[in-house]
Amino acid sequence: MRIVTWNINSLRLRLPLLARLCAELQPDIVCVQETKVPDDLFPADAVRKLGFAHIQHRGMKSYNGVAILSRVALVPLDDTPDWCARSDCRHIAASFDLGGQPVELHNFYVPAGGDIPDPEANPKFAHKLAFVDEAHAWFTGRDNRRTILVGDLNIAPLEQDVWNHRQLLNVVSHTPPETTRLLAWQACGFVDAMRHFVPASEKLYTWWSYRNRNWTEANPERWNRGRRLDHVWVTPDLMASLRDMTVLREARDWPTTSDHAPVVVDFTP
């Protein structure tokens, strides 16, 4: 079972890149964020042609949006909250069969939070903190077994998740109010599947800014200014099923691509 999570930054715009990803990786399930398409305009026929007969999507015009594209049957989970009472299409969930038992799959797009790391001065940052607090509380109150959580969580929680820990401590996505909240959410019943394969002492990124046009230059001190904003968490009972993890870094260099790279995780029953 191969699951990919990718902030695609406009599904309709990047359908050819989704097709390329699927041709190269042959994923069983793709979770996408920032689809930026309302439900009535979702390109379901084009997605089915890529081999995904089972589709769950929740979207709105121009902003946000999440979807689960699957070759295996999905059972929608409809009891998820309206986060922060905004109905802004940031979470979708379904279950599927893995090894003869159901597994819950949650796909999140956490608010980015704007530029000012002050909830009093920046309502976007306040929204981000409130969203993570609500998600933490909701999962704390659930029976979290056989669960996978993926998505663009828009927070790089560890020192080696950013290119320079000290310089980014006051930059939104790596501030202590964000990182402590995200790690508390994770600790309510999840294990960081990406760091299972790449130790926390090693650099690991999934996002590189569009502003960094020279990101592929040979000198890593100049180009490799990334952050790990995309995540895969699993409950401890699924740890034995983890087989491999890859950040498809080369996809960040595809023409007209997203600023996020896809993350690929392989499971066995």
Image: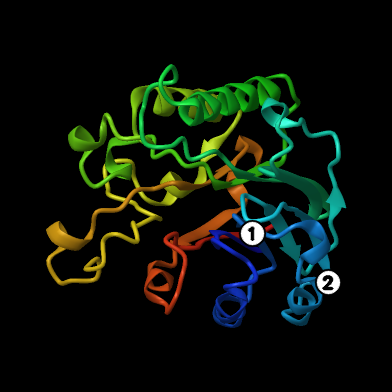
Instruction: Measure the alpha-carbon separation of dots 2 and 1.
Output: 18 Å
Residue type at tag 2: Ala
Vertical placement of residue 144 versus 42, above or below: above
Which circle marks residue 78 in the picture? Answer: none
Vertical placement of residue 255 versus 32, above or below: below
Which sits earlier in the primary sequence, circle 2 or circle 1? 1
Q: Which residue is mark 2?
A: 53
Quarter of image, res 127:
top right
- Element marked by disc 1: loop
Residue at point 83% right, 71% down?
53
Vertical placement of residue 83 versus 2, above or below: above
Residue 129 location (% of width, % of height): 51, 24
Residue 137 location (% of width, % of height): 65, 19
- Residue 190 visible in image: yes
Q: How is the image coloured?
A: rainbow
Q: Residues within 10 Å of mark 1 (few under 14, many from 20)?
A: many
- Quadrant housing the N terminus: bottom right
Residue at point 69% right, 40% down?
88
- Element marked by disc 2: loop
- Residue 104 visible in image: no
- Quadrant housing the C terminus: bottom right
**Horizontally, is 115 left or right of 140 in the view?**
left
Residue at point 44% right, 26% down?
122
Residue type at tag 1: Thr
Q: Which residue is mark 1?
A: 35
Residue 195 location (% of width, % of height): 42, 45
